[in-house]
Image (cartoon, coloured by chain):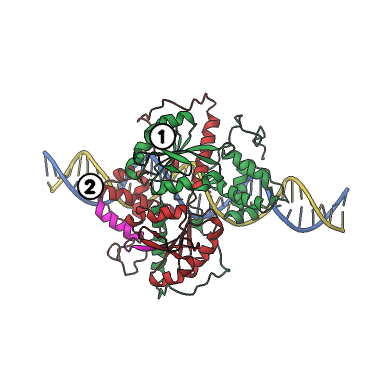
Chain colours: A red, B green, C blue, D yellow
Amino acid sequence: MSQHRHPGAPGRAGAVPALPDLPEATVARLPEYLRALHNLADAGHETVSSEGLSAAAGVNSAKLRKDLSHLGSYGTRGVGYDVALLIEQIEYVLGLTQRRAVALVGVGNLGHALAGYDGFASRGFRIAALLDADPSRVGEEINGLVVRHVDDLPTVAAEESLAIGVIATPAAAAQQVADQLVAVGVTSILNFAPCVLSVPEGVDVRKVDLAIELQILSFHEHRKASLTALPATGGTALTALPGGFAATDTQEAIGT
Amino acid sequence: MSQHRHPGAPGRAGAVPALPDLPEATVARLPEYLRALHNLADAGHETVSSEGLSAAAGVNSAKLRKDLSHLGSYGTRGVGYDVALLIEQIEYVLGLTQRRAVALVGVGNLGHALAGYDGFASRGFRIAALLDADPSRVGEEINGLVVRHVDDLPTVAAEESLAIGVIATPAAAAQQVADQLVAVGVTSILNFAPCVLSVPEGVDVRKVDLAIELQILSFHEHRKASLTALPATGGTALTALPGGFAATDTQEAIGT
DNA sequence: AGGCGCTTGTGAAGACGTGCACAAATCGCG
DNA sequence: CGCGATTTGTGCACGTCTTCACAAGCGCCT
C-alpha cells in the first residue's frame, strides 16, 4: 500500500522523479518537521517515533504520520523513523538539496533585517542579491553584499539562476517590483508588503504581513475580554502553571 | 435571517456585546478586507460592492460576502457596502477601537526592524516597551524608545496594560521569554523564533517563520521544475503578460 | 407606481483537513 | 521459534472551508 513511488525516490537530484503532489497543509508542515528533526539529530538521536517527533513539532501524531506517509516515507514499525533518512527525504521533497538563490528587493528597515537574518543561510537559501530603487541606498554594503539598483535585475538574473524573490518594499512599489521579478524569470515571490500582488499564472506568491498577525491576535484578545465579564485585574500573579499546556490551535495556523 | 445581533453591535466599546464567534478562516481575512477598505476610503469611495472589495483583497466574492455576513454586517442589496461603516464594524470586531500596547522582546536584527516598522502604529498598535536580555543592549534608544532589561517586565506590565507580546529572540531564549510574558499576564504572543512554544491554555500563540515561508516556495519551485521536463532557459523574455492574472492560491495561505 | 437591473445573503454540495482507532508489521526476548 | 510489546500506516467519520447558484431585497428610471 505504500509502493506508489519506489522509482528513484530519495537518491539524488538530477533526474525527474515526479514529486508526489502533497496536500498544501502537509507542505506547510514539512519545514516544521525538518527543523525538529535537525534538533533531534544535533541531540544525538538516531531514530524517533511519530509520537516524539510530533511533540517536538507541536502537532498531532496521527497527522504527522499521515503527512509522512504522503511522501512515501519509510518508517519502521515498532521502531520509528530514521532521523537522518527522514531529513534527507524531506529536504529532497522541499527541493533543498540545492542551495537556492534569493533576490531581496527593498533594503529599508525590514530589508536590512532580512539581509542579516542567518535563518535563511542556515536553512537552505543564499541571498544572491540586494536591490533597491532608491539611488542613495545603492552601493551600501550589508552583510558582505553590495546593494544594487533594482533596474540591474536582468543583469543579476543573468549571473545567477534566480527562482525566488523577496519583496520588502513599501506597498506602493511592490507591484512594480513583482512585475520586474516576473520579467526576469522569477516564479516564486515572498511578499512582505501589505498589498495584493497580481502575477501571471504559474507564479507562486506567499504573503507575510506582520500587522495582520497582530490584528488576528487582537481579535482573540477582544473575544477573551468580552467573554470574561470579570474584574480584569490584568497585572499580577498567574504563574505559568505547568499543568495545562497545549500547543494552541493558532500555533500552527501561520502556514495555511 | 441576519438579525442575530442587533443589541449594541457597532456602537461603542465598553459594553459586552457578545462577539459572534467567527470561523478562524474568516478572522484571518478580516484584516485584509480592512486594509483594502482603507485604501478605498482614501481613494474617495463611499460604497463598494462585494465584487469590488473582493478583487481588492484578492479573494472570491462569495467568500467575502459570507465572511461579512458572519459579523452581521449590513450591506445594501443593489448598492453594496458602505465603506466607512464597514471599516468601523471590522475594527470593532477585531478589537482595534482601542490602541493596544505591545511589548517587543529581543532587539537583535529582526527586533530592530520591528521596532521601526510603522505598520504597527498605523494599524492600531503601539509598541509600549522594548526589552532584551543582553545587558549591553539595555539603554539603547530605538525609535524614541529605550531598551529595558527583560527582567523589568513586571514593572512594565504594571505601567501599561500589556496584552500582546512579540518574541524576536533566538530560538533558545524564546520559551523562557514566553514564560515571563505569560507570568505578567500577556495572553497573546506573536513568535518569530523558530521553535514551538508551550503556553497555558487561554494564551494564543501565532508563529511567523520566515525561513519556512521560503521552504514552502522552494517546494513549489521543485515541483514546477520536476513537471517541466523542458529546456529551462531561465533567463530572458517572458514579459508580464496582462492576460492571465490570478490571485494565486498561496496568496492568502499565510493566515491559516 | 410599477418594473427592471443590480447586489446581497445564504442553502446546499463538494473539497479539504483532522483525528480516532485499529490492523499490519517489526523487533527483542525468553 | 514463537510471543508480546511497540509503532507505523490508514480506513473512516466528522468538522471546517469553499464555491456555486439563486431567491430576496433595494434603488432607479420611466
Q: Position of residue A146 (x, y in %)?
A: 39, 63
Decide: is B224 above or below B67.
below
Residue B240 highlighted magenta (yes or no): no
- Residue nearest the viewer, comparing B130 with B96: B130
Query: Can you see residue B200?
Result: no
Residue drawn 38% across the image and 33% down it? B180
Do the residues bearing badges 1 and 2 touch, measured as CB atoms within 8 Å?
no
Kindly give the residue lying farthest to the top in the view shown. A231
For residue D7, what is the image quadrant? top left
Q: Is residue B114 left or right of residue A1?
A: right
Residue A43, numbered circle: none
Q: Which range is magenta?
A: A74-102
For residue B151, what is the image quadrant? top left
Residue A75 highlighted magenta (yes or no): yes
Decide: is A124 above or below A224.
below
Which residue in the protein does label 1 denote? B181
Residue A45, numbered circle: 2
Quarter holding the N terminus of chain A is: bottom left
Q: Position of residue B96 (x, y in %)?
A: 57, 39
Query: Can you see residue A111?
Result: yes
Q: Position of residue A84 (x, y in %)?
A: 25, 54
Q: Is residue B110 left or right of residue A193?
A: left
Say what amino acid the circle numbered 1 marks.
Leu
Q: Position of residue A206 (x, y in %)?
A: 47, 56
